[in-house]
Image (cartoon, grey):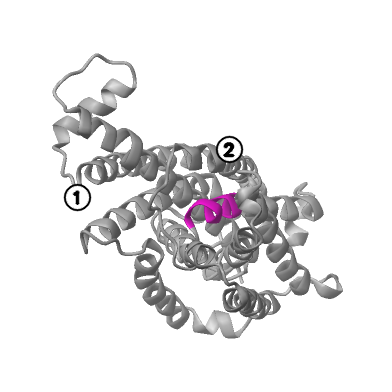
Amino acid sequence: MSRVLGLANLRDYRQAGVVPRLAVGALLLGALILAASLVSLSLGPVNIPASHVASIVLSMIGLDVAGFGRTEQLVIEQIRLPRIVVGASVGAALGVAGATMQGLFRNPMADPGIVGVSAGGAVGAVVAIATGMTGLFFLALPTFAFVGAVAATFLVYGIAAVGGRFSMATLLLAGVAVNAFLGAIVSAIIIVLPNNEALREILFWLTGGLDSRSWEHVRISAPLIVGGVAVVLLMSRDLNLLMLGDDEAKSMGVRVSVARPVLLAAAALATGAAVAVSGTIAFVGLVTPHVLRLLLGPDHRVLAPLSAAGGAVFVIVADTVARTIVQPAEFRVGVLTAFVGAPFFIFLLIKNKRQVYSL
C-alpha cells in the first residue's frame, strides 16, 4: 500500500530536507496567490487598473496613497476582496483536508468529497436552510455544516473499521454508499420544500460558489478553518507515521486511537466551515495535494502547509474564471472545478488501477 503514495522511503526523510522544500514551495505559491489575487481584484464588470488596485490595498493597511476613485475603492473593499479571502480560505481548507484524507487512508484518490465529508456538510447546511434555522442565529449554517461533516466522516470511518480492523476497500465503498444516501436526503428535501427562496439557497450548496460573499462570511468561517488547518499542521509528523501503518506508528510513539480521530475531526472542521460559506466545491482536495505530492514528495510537514497555499491558488483562479467567462452572468465555481477535477480523477483511476483493485 505504501507504494501508492510513494512512501517506501518515508522513514529515511531527514529534517534538513524539509525547510528548503517548504521555503521554496511557500515562496512560489505565495507569489501565485498574490498574482492571482491582483488579477481577480482587477477583473469584473468594472475593470480596475492594477495600479489602482495596489493603491487601494495599500490604503487599507494604513498607508496614505492616492490615485483611485471612491467607486473603485468600494468595489475592492466590499465586494471583491472579501470574496477572494473567502475563496482562499475555502481552498486552503479543502487542500489540507484532502492531503489529510489521502494520508490517513493511504490512497491518492481520497478527498473530503469521496469519503462523505463535503456531502455531510452540505446536508447539514441544507437542513439548516430548510428548517429556517439560519434566520434564528447567524452561526446556524456553519454549525449544522460542521455537525454534518463530522457525522459523515465518522460514519464512513466507522464502517471501514468494523471488527477492529481498518479496511481501505471498505472505506471507499462506504464512501460511495454514504454519498448516495446523503444525496438522497438533499433530493428529498428539495422535493418537499415549498419555499422557493430556500430552494434557491439549496441550489447554491449543490453547485458551489462565492458570489455575494462578505466580510461577515470571513468572520464566520475563518476561525474554524484556521483551527482545523492548524491541528493538521501540528500533527503532520504523526500523519507521516500513520501512513506507514498502525503498528509502525505505535512503535514510534503515536497514539493511533487518538491521532486518527483528531486528524479526521480537524479535516471535518475545516471542510465543514468551507462548505458553510461556499457550498460544495469538488475536487480541490483531490487535485491540489496530489500534484504537490508529485512535485515535493509525501512528507506532510511540507505537503500539508503547501496544500493550503495550493488550494487557495486553485479556488481564486477558478472563481476569477467563473465570474468573468460569461459576463454579465456568473459560472458556478463548483461546476468549473468539477470540469478540471473529474478528468484528473479518471486519470488517477487508470494510472493506479492495479493498486486500487488490490485494496
Name the residue rendered at 65%, 44% in the picture: 137
Q: Is residue 143 above or below residue 279?
A: above
Indicate which disc residue 246 carries: none
Q: For residue 115, what is the image quadrant? A: bottom right
Residue 96 visible to the viewer = no
Give the crowd class for mark 2: few <14, some 14-19, many >=20 residues within 10 Å. Answer: few
Name the residue rendered at 74%, 73% in the picture: 160
Q: Is residue 255 above or below residue 57?
A: below
Name the residue rendered at 44%, 67% in the picture: 207
- What is the magenta range? 270-278
Name the residue type under label 1.
Pro
Q: Which residue is mark 1?
A: 45
Q: For residue 69, what is the image quadrant? A: top left
Please tell me which of labels 2 and 1 falls first in the chain: 1
* Mark 2 touches mark 1? (CB < 8 Å): no
Residue 236 visible to the viewer = yes
Circle 1 sits in a helix, a strand or a loop, which is it?
Answer: loop
In x, y percent, where is residue 180?
A: 62, 80
Q: Is residue 179 above or below residue 214?
A: below
| Magenta stretch: includes residue 353 | no
Name the residue type under label 2.
Pro
Q: Which residue is mark 2?
A: 223
* 320 on left or right of 286: left
